[in-house]
Image (tube, rainbow, N blue to C red):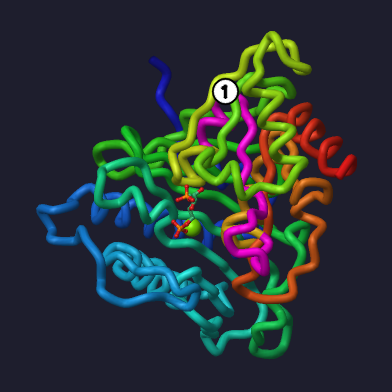
Amino acid sequence: MTALIDLASHLAGDPSSPAVKTVVTEIAAACARISRVVAGGAILGNLGAAGITNVQDEEQKKLDILTNDLLSDALKACEPVAGIASEELEHVETTGRHGGYLVTFDPLDGSSNIDVNVSVGTIFSILPAPEGREPTEADFLQPGRHQVGAGYAVYGPQTMLVLTLTSGVVGFTLSADDRWLLTHAKSTIPADTAEFAINMSNQRHWAAPIRRYVDGCLQGKEGPRAKNFNMRWVASMVADVHRILMRGGIFMYPWDAREPTKPGKLRLMYEANPMALIVERAGGKATDGVTPILDLAPSKLHQRVPVVLGSANEVDEVARETVAG
Ligand code: AHM
Ligand code: MG
């Protein structure tokens, strides 16, 4: 087997600014530490609820808090970072530095899977910061197209880091001696798929277009789509998106009538946008049903958004249904 190159060697050949590379290196190191904290599970006494809720009124797990602190501290100490925003923090935090970058993140996505030893992950997005002054919350509200980089770490059978900077999507696997080794040099999502991912238990709450689309999949060869579909749902976005990156598929978390005033469950700034950049760079599509996620103008830090992403032809199929109403 030929020797695998590590993250530092890969970054050396990337046209991103040295400052972006510094931020990515810091995040990668923090994710390696998070991997150990997650893997320690019950031995480290880190499983279970923390007994408090976050700004989104969701119950926080001990690991949500630990990983948020770990990543926040690492980024606030990282020279090119002017500010951070996290799923677990109500407001943005600034570092007192000007220029450089803003980082938004979900420190441990897939919280419901932590205590049952199913894959969870960290998602991050890097945006340019304003020059010559401290950033405010409004400076974070940039469309996803402005991202200078995005990625995720998945803590599964292997710990992997998936990254997009100026182009392409690359994947690194964490070695036993804590090095990120390039194992997936160019990930692409096939345009066609016969695998969908959605929380089917919400079927009765969906709007008509999503119902029609999923009905078509369920009818298989005998239905309008004339092919059989398989279904997967990990309930960790990171793991579901990672599967799609590895072998194609479509992932949906649509609006549903349980909470009619919320546009969806997933958050734009630190879940949908970074995943949308990765999916588009891998040749897939990511929309809110019709509009590319990356073109949405954010209005709130913790804004939610419907998400449909993955294999391009299936995402287009959902758009056709959505336009039909
Ligand atoms: P979290 O950030 O609190 O973990 O919530 C986001 C997660 C996603 O990872 C996943 O796609 C979704 O929530 C699962 O939702 P459900 O429990 O409705 O299946
Ligand atoms: Mg999340």
Q: How many marks?
A: 1
- Judge by depth and name the residue closer to the eye, 179 or 120: 120
Residue at image coords 51%, 36%: 242
The extreme front residue here reads: 204
SS assignment at label 1: helix
- Judge by depth and name the residue closer to the eye, 324 or 250: 324
Relative to residue 230, is residue 258 depicted above or below?
below
Residue at image coords 62%, 28%: 249
What's the magenta region?
A: 242-263
Q: Quadrant of the N terminus?
A: top left
Q: Position of residue 35 (x, y in %)?
A: 30, 50
User: Which residue corresponds to mark 1?
Assistant: 247
Residue at image coords 56%, 67%: 104
The extreme right residue here reads: 324
- Judge by depth and name the residue closer to the eye, 228 or 48: 228
Relative to residue 275, is residue 243 depicted above or below?
above
The answer to which image quadrant residue 30 occupies is bottom left
Q: Is residue 126 in view from this perspective?
A: no
